[in-house]
Image (cartoon, rainbow, N blue to C red):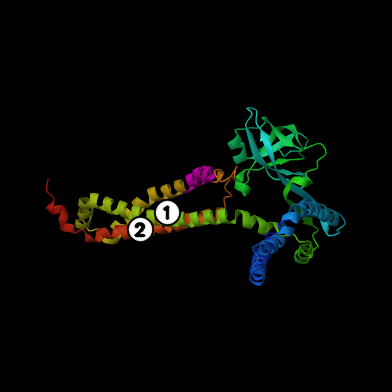
Amino acid sequence: MKNSNFKRFILLWMGQLISAIGGGLTSFGLGVYVFEKTGSAAGMALVTLLGFLPTLLLSVPAGVLADRYENIGGITERLLEELGTDSDVLKYVALKTVSCPAILSDGTQVNLFVETGEHSVFPVKYAEGKQPEAEGEIALSSLQAQDLGLQIGDMLELESGGKRNAFEVCGIYSDITNGGKTAKVKSLSPDGNVDDRVIWSILYVSLKDDVLEEPWMKAYKQYGVDVVNIADYVQGTYGPTIWQIEKARLVAMGIAILIVMVVVMLFMRLLIEKKRYGISLQKALGFNNVCIRKEYFIYGAIPITVGVLAGVLFGNILGESICGQILKSLGAFGFHFVIRWEQVIFMVLVLMVTAAVALCIGTLEVKKIKAYECCMRKE
């Protein structure tokens, strides 16, 4: 559940834009009308001034009042109260993100997106260390830690409420949101109050097993917040990356099949050409094409089988580290392959069938060799 009213904001902004254009044209039109009726430039200027005077006088106090009236922190607290009394909810937590200055040991100051709250309610898997459980502990995303040059046990200071508080890096995790540069703490200050600086907040909710998700989500959307299933949220966040990997997998499969086909055919043709005299001699001795092709099929199948099995084995071992390095640059730290053996076996069978077809095509060259060629060989 995320407090993000972007669509409503766009609608409100468009309405305000149209209203501002209409108001400006009306004020200008009244000024022109007064000038035509009176011929007085002062009258025209006075009407124009009166048209813009409310905006000049009320913009600042109206902005202050708008900020005080149920900001993101206020909406979050209202939702927490509602969730606390909801019998359909098993557990929940609010994680509030703020932007605050961070001061490194060398005095360098940077801005961090810091997510505050009880991270132990819905824990994530950390590549190194652990989640922030106590005051003065901070976890960094892998890209953020790399960018700041920090490791487990290093210290930095966060400025909150005009005070600097020291934090020790306790964990490093994967994250590709917000450019992959985020941080997590239990609280920024002893009082834990960050409501006046919240940029956005996310409420994670776990429902009881017998609760229907769709009606529950629809009911909470009436509070003016976006409510999404975590599976849809993960798909929206990691979907493009997963799709790119899927496309890379399909392309790699196609290239692998093509390479096996071409290499095996060339290998067999070169081998048969090298053994041309021997094959011709075999034909002269009475061996037919079927026997000779079968012999060279087996001769080529043994190294090809070993090569395919070795390629699949090393692909799963080295491929994980190569893909891991690519995804690490995007913020996905600690990448591991989940090997589906049924797909591995399927791919091995596909490659073996491809190799068999290529061997059959390659051994067709045997038919072109004549029995009398061995007698024409020049020493």
Q: Position of residue 61 (x, y in %)?
A: 77, 52
Above or below, 149 against 22 in this view is above
Label 2: element kind = helix
- Element under label 1? helix
Which callout, 1 or 2, points to the residue nearer the camera? 1
Q: Magenta span: helix, strand or loop, mainly?
A: helix
Going by the numbered disc 1, the residue's amino acid type is Ala
Residue located beneath label 1 in the image: 256
Query: Residue shown at 22%/60% (left/top)?
Result: 368
Is 370 rendered above or below residue 313?
A: below
The residues colored magenta run: 312-326
Amino acid type at mark 2: Ala
Question: Which residue is rendered at x = 37% and y = 60% of the image?
Answer: 357
Q: Is residue 214 left or right of residue 127?
A: right
Disc 2 target residue:
358
* Residue closer to the observer: 98 or 23: 23
Give whichever of discs 1 and 2 has the lower sequence position.
Answer: 1
Which residue is pictured at 20% across the width and 53% down the height? Answer: 281
Q: Are marks 1 and 2 in contact (CB under 8 Å)?
A: no
